[in-house]
């Protein structure tokens, strides 16, 4: 693909302020935040033989040349409007004892909807030759889950609908080349640094599952209904923060993890990094344009940034602030960071040891019953019999066809989902990944039982050979069964569950086992 340096990021107004006005207002908001002062480092800073942390960072634009075919919706959308650029943000870590490497990791946060099956493995092969001395199995990709990013699977939609837009098969080589350049820069540019960690809070994601009087549950439905009784589950508003500093104690990179997918712009026909773009802009006003910001999504299969209630009062506050909704969410994230950063600098260390485990874990799949298979086959047969198919037909056919395919695999004895699990220890902090849209309850179980002082969980990461989808709770599954109505209890039926509650519990236990192993050393 051609270089996209010619693409201009367009001003986004949408009822709020322009990007220029947004940044101008932000300057006043952050001016009162004190500049980072002296950092408390380890007493072992100059002692020979101490394990030291080496850090490298890079950010790269991964926005394709427009027009762009967008994923994240039932039908493909084609756009030439770049509301905000998509980026991949890279953090390279290495723990060294003298000149001896102890362990290593490369974390990549991508402004993509999901990491499709095969993409991570293909990228590892693509970049391996540019990373001498690095084990590419210790590199993982994670998606922010923006619903305004390019399609990365050629067959996701009907190919004729792509028109003259950048084809998915052409976007991937472009993506790999851009990310490989950034990864190589980060790895080659690593130097002695330090890390601090902290916790903040921001209301960004909210539970999106509505429960009615008869026990039915629906995802992202309207609660303004006489039968509405309550929101289904707990909400997680924690913001986990890691700050990485260079040898001069200047902030070089940050990992920010929160339980919310970046899908506020869902359904709009624009390319957008969603609220992560707005948060990054605000952080760079304060800390400089080279700050590398890795935004990760914590377990939040049942949370999203869209409001179920208080919509008008929230919209009024946005209007009074002169902000769009993504700008408001970005502001909340930035304010949480500023609040925590002043505390984090009081305990920053450069002598911590990185340990990185990569495990392949087999989870039991959710069993598809004969009746559920019959429903799925009936829907597929009905669509196949139509003389013409709409985009909606194609989306429904893929979902119900997936149920049929998994049922047939199940009949052959294939009842396990193999996932890649990364668990890292950085001092008193544990980081653990999963490839799913994992319901909040599972993340809370891991957090509550973890041996680490602070546990950072990253979902939509390290996807393997098969789509991962949602992992619901037993409570969500009880909200309604699989039917011919596609949105019935969406996210909690076999239509979008390769792994169910049983597998979710196994994931919790295997993750905790790995964390305990690291913290017992």
Image (cartoon, grey):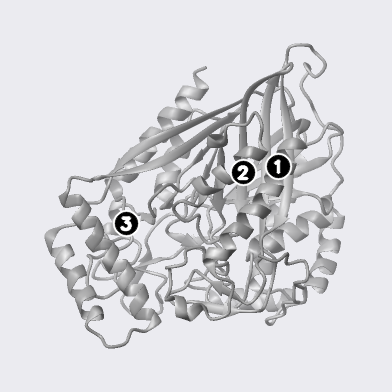
Q: Which residue is mark 1?
A: 184
Task: Calculate the distance from the C-alpha at mark 2 to the C-alpha at mark 3.
Answer: 32 Å
Q: State the residue at coordinates (31%, 50%).
A: 499
Q: State the residue at coordinates (67%, 58%).
A: 87
Name the one closer to the observer, 125 or 284.
Answer: 125
Front tag of 2 and 3: 2
Dot placed on the residue nearer the N-terminal end, 2 or 3: 2
Location of residue 387 with respect to 33 vertically, above or below: below
Q: Which residue is mark 2?
A: 127
Q: Residue furthest top?
A: 48
Disc 2 packing (10 Å; few <14; some 14–19; many ≥20) = some
Secondary structure category for the residue under label 1: helix
Dot placed on the residue nearer the N-terminal end, 3 or 1: 1
Q: Which residue is mark 3?
A: 497
> What x and y, as percent, mark residue 127?
62, 43
> What x and y, as percent, mark residue 9?
75, 72
């Amino acid at each position: 693909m051609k270089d996209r340096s010619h693409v201009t990021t367009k001003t986004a107004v949408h009822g709020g302020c322009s990007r220029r006005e947004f940044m101008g207002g932000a300057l006043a908001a952050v001016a009162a935040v004190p500049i980072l002062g002296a950092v408390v480092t380890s007493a072992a800073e100059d002692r020979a033989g101490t394990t030291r942390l080496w850090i490298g960072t890079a950010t790269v634009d991964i926005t394709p040349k427009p027009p762009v075919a967008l994923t994240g919706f039932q039908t493909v959308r084609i756009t030439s409007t770049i509301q905000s650029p998509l980026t991949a943000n890279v953090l390279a870590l290495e723990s060294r004892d003298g000149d001896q490497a102890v362990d290593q990791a490369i974390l990549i946060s991508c402004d993509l909807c999901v990491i499709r099956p095969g993409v991570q493995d293909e990228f590892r092969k693509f970049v391996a030759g540019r990373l001498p001395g690095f084990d590419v199995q210790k590199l993982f990709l994670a998606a922010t889950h923006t619903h305004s990013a390019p399609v990365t699977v050629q067959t996701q939609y009907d190919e004729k609908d792509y028109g003259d837009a950048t084809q998915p098969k052409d976007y991937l080589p472009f993506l790999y080349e851009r990310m490989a350049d950034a990864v190589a820069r980060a790895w080659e540019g690593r130097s002695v640094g330090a890390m601090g960690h902290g916790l903040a809070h921001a209301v960004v994601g909210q539970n999106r599952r509505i429960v009615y009087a008869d026990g039915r549950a629906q995802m992202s439905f309207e609660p303004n209904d006489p039968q509405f009784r309550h929101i289904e589950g707990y909400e997680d508003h924690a913001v986990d923060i890691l700050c990485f500093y260079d040898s001069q104690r200047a902030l070089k990179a940050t990992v920010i993890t929160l339980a919310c997918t970046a899908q506020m712009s869902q359904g709009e026909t624009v390319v957008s990094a969603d609220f992560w773009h707005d948060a990054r802009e605000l952080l760079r006003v304060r800390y400089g344009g080279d700050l590398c910001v890795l935004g990760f999504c914590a377990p939040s299969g049942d949370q999203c940034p869209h409001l179920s209630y208080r919509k008008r009062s929230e919209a009024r506050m946005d209007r009074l602030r002169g902000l769009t909704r993504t700008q408001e969410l970005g502001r909340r994230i930035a304010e949480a960071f500023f609040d925590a950063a002043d505390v984090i600098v009081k305990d920053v260390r450069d002598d911590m040891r990185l340990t990185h485990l990569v495990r392949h874990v087999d989870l039991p799949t959710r069993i598809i019953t004969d009746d559920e298979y019959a429903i799925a086959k009936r829907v597929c047969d009905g669509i196949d019999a139509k003389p013409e198919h709409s985009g909606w037909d194609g989306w429904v056919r893929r979902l119900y066809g997936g149920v049929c395919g998994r049922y047939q695999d199940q009949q052959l004895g294939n009842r396990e989902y193999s996932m890649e699990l990364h668990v890292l220890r950085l001092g008193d902090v544990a980081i653990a990944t999963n490839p799913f849209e994992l319901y909040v309850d599972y993340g809370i179980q891991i957090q509550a039982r973890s041996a680490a002082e602070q546990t950072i969980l990253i979902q939509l990461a390290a996807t393997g050979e098969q789509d991962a989808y949602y992992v619901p709770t037993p409570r969500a599954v009880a909200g309604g069964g699989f039917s011919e109505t596609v949105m019935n209890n969406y996210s909690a039926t076999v239509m979008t569950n390769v792994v169910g509650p049983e597998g979710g519990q196994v994931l919790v236990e295997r993750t905790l086992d790995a964390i305990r192993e690291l913290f017992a050393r």
